[in-house]
Image: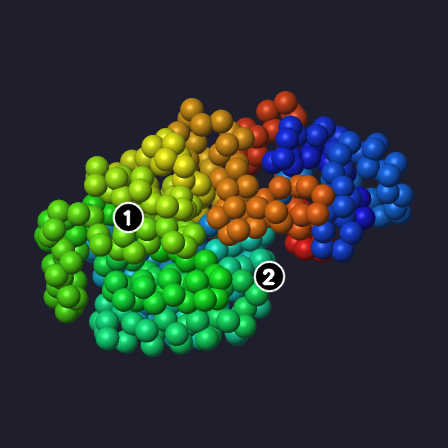
Amino acid sequence: MIIRAKVVVTMDGPPIENGAVAISGDRILEVGKFADVTKKYSTEEIVDLSEQALLPGLINAHCHLDYTCLHGKIPRQKSFTDWIQAINAEKAKLSPKDYVRSINEGFTEAKRFGTTTIANLTAFPELVSKVQAPIRTWWFAELIDVRDPSRANEIVDLAAEQLKPQKHWGLAPHTPFTASANLYRRCEEIARRENILLTTHLAESSEEMSMFQDAKGPLYEFLKEIGRDMSDCGRGTPSAHFRIIEGNRPCLLVHVNELTKTGFDLLTKMKIKSSIVHCPRSHEYFGHSSFQYDKLRDLGFNICLGTDSLASNDDLSLLAELRAFQKVFPDVSPEDILKMVTVNPARALQQENALGKIRAGFAADLVALPITKSTSVFEEIIAFNGAVTWSMLEGRI
Ligand SMILES: [Zn+2]
């Protein structure tokens, strides 16, 4: 099959006007000028996308589809801790069936907006076998042991067993304030043994920083009240967990909004410069401190974007995330911004030789959307508001 478009945005060199992509099975055979590709591969099946841009399928580096059904249920709260309590109250009303429905609805929405690969955290690894993911999915088990740290190993091992049958899976110790140091350690052990990825929320809110550095603030008080061992707080450093995730295994660090000098020093020392996932609209919803894009990129981190969940966002459109990012960082080139939902997350998922670009041998995951001028194609893609008009996953339209 040959697909022709007004412009093919390969993310692997300059965009190709009047370009074409030849597909065989679930792979890309060739990409180039329409005339050259048709000369090389004679086929009866030509899909002409006419006045559209064809680009690699988008990759969402951080999402919680569990909470799709909480869209609009949690108004902005005074503090991050209030939001945690509000979402806990909403979660208490949901049954396993509700969660399965919520995950399925989330998949449909993500796909509609051009996402073909997603790094999805689920608090319910036992439900994953009940879901037929319509896009390429990395299932991460979100793990919390704040109420029972003596069960850390058991919690991790059970989740690993539940996710093992999945093609792509990983572990997500939730965050240093809900997951014990032992739970982080066990996740690292399993990640090494199974050769899987890790992801974790880190330094998301100023309340997390006050808790770890100064042993005070609303998050500190809340967690102390529910019985968390607070002996790792008040030592003037961000969190001992920084050291645990110091870079022995590649990890997707999510948020990293609130960084003091010590936090930066710890990141600077990390052996493997992991990926950092910024969620622009969720960041705006909570009103966190400015994301330090330039500094983190200059340290060598691979910056990706994610939507987070609909409990703190309006929809699962990655293009809307690009616009939100561009509003805050107008000096970053539109091409570099688009890389944060294609090339960069492909690298974060260790798929830099298979996803995120239109290149021979890569997976045939493609999306298209209408454009008017091909001279400013990256700007037009970022400005596109709505569902994509065409998509292909693993060679199937
Ligand atoms: Zn999250």
Please tell me the numbered disc located at residue 134: 2
The residue type indicated by label 1 comes to Glu
Q: Secondary structure at mark 1?
A: loop
Please tell me the numbered disc located at residue 38: none
Nearer to us: label 1 or label 2: 1
Q: Secondary structure at mark 2?
A: loop
- Judging depth in this view, the residue of 99 and 126 nearest the camera is 126
> At which x and y percent is residue 292?
32, 35
Q: Who's the residue at 51% across and 59% down the image?
A: 138
Number of on-image labels: 2
- Judging depth in this view, the residue of 220 and 159 nearest the camera is 159
Is any atom of residue 181 visible in this view?
yes
> At which x and y percent is residue 26?
72, 55
In the picture shown, does residue 372 fall above or below 260?
above
In the picture shown, does residue 144 fall above or below 111?
below
> At which x and y percent is residue 91?
32, 67
Q: Who's the residue at 21% across and 41% down the image?
A: 262
Please tell me the numbered disc located at residue 204: 1
Q: CA distance from mark 1 to mark 2?
A: 30 Å
In the picture shown, does residue 189 fall above or below 5?
below
Q: Who's the residue at 45% across and 58% down the image?
A: 197
Crowding near the residue tagged with mark 1, few <14, some 14–19, many ≥20 C-alpha atoms within 10 Å: many
Q: Who's the residue at 32% across and 51% down the image?
A: 246
In this rendering, position of residue 149 left or right of residue 210: right
Question: Quadrant of residue 369 in the image?
Answer: top right
In this rendering, position of residue 165 left or right of residue 391: left
Crowding near the residue tagged with mark 2, few <14, some 14–19, many ≥20 C-alpha atoms within 10 Å: some
Mark sitting earlier along the chain (1/2): 2
In this rendering, position of residue 345 left or right of residue 10: left
- Judging depth in this view, the residue of 93 and 337 nearest the camera is 337
The residue type indicated by label 2 comes to Pro
Is any atom of residue 112 visible in this view?
no
